[in-house]
């Protein structure tokens, strides 16, 4: 009986690891498609002499950002969605603020600044007055 439980537990772990890997690669392929589409929109804006300043600013954020001191990763996708821990939400840049909104009603607002050729992102959390540093992966 004990041996069956151990085998069932191992199978459950393997299945959950396998399924979580499938979900991640699916999001990456969608993100790559959306990133290409976003780049095409920026090219179109340039050709039409439109104002693409907002798109250029948002494109600085797109990607995976890691903070090693608190072991936190933020994924900001080009389609305006984000992943923080295991929660998906939306993100936007407005008036010099990075705003992330999640379905559970939790909204995170940060003052931001970049350094090192947009490879380092400093996020200053307004609610707690805490600044964290993220590196683009």
Image (tube, grey):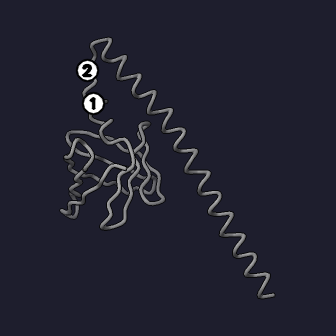
Quarter of the image that includes the N terminus:
bottom right
User: In terms of depth relative to the viewer, which is nearer, 68 or 113?
Assistant: 68
User: In terms of depth relative to the viewer, which is nearer, 116 or 66?
Assistant: 116
Residue in the picture at 21% in, 57% down: 126
User: In terms of depth relative to the viewer, which is nearer, 67 or 49?
Assistant: 67
Answer with left or right where residue 72 lies relative to residue 114: right
Q: Which mark is residue 137?
A: none
Disc 2 crowd, CA 10 A, few/some/many (<14, 14-19, 20+): few
Displayed quadrant of residue 131: bottom left
Spatial CA distance of label 2 from label 1 is 8 Å
Q: Position of residue 85 (x, y in %)?
A: 44, 60
Farthest residue toward the bottom?
Answer: 2
In the rendered image, the vertical position of residue 71 relative to residue 23, given as above or below:
below
Mark 1: which secondary structure? helix
Displayed quadrant of residue 45: top left
Disc 2 and disc 1 in contact, CB within 8 angstroms: yes
Answer with left or right where residue 110 lies relative to residue 62: left
In the rendered image, the vertical position of residue 33 relative to residue 88, given as above or below:
above
Mark 2: which secondary structure? loop
Answer with left or right where residue 87 lies relative to residue 95: right
Give the mark count: 2
Residue in the picture at 41% in, 50% down: 75
Residue in the picture at 36% in, 19% down: 43
Q: Position of residue 110 (x, y in %)?
A: 24, 52
Residue in the picture at 22% in, 41% down: 117
Disc 1 crowd, CA 10 A, few/some/many (<14, 14-19, 20+): few
> To which residue does mark 2 refer?
51
> To which residue does mark 1 refer?
54
Q: Position of residue 21 (x, y in %)?
A: 59, 55
Q: Position of residue 46 (x, y in %)?
A: 30, 16
């Amino acid at each position: 009986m004990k041996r069956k439980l151990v085998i069932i537990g191992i199978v459950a772990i393997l299945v959950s690891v396998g399924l979580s890997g499938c979900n991640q690669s699916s999001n990456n392929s969608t993100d790559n498609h959306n990133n290409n589409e976003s780049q095409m929109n920026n090219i179109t804006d340039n050709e039409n002499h439109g104002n693409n300043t907002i798109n250029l600013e948002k494109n600085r954020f797109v990607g995976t950002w890691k903070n090693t001191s608190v072991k936190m990763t933020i994924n900001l996708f080009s389609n305006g969605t984000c992943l923080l821990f295991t929660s998906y939400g939306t993100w936007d840049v407005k008036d010099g603020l990075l705003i992330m909104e999640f379905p559970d009603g939790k909204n995170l607002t940060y003052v931001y600044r970049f350094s090192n050729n947009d490879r380092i992102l400093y996020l200053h959390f307004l609610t707690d007055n805490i600044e964290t540093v993220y590196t683009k992966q």
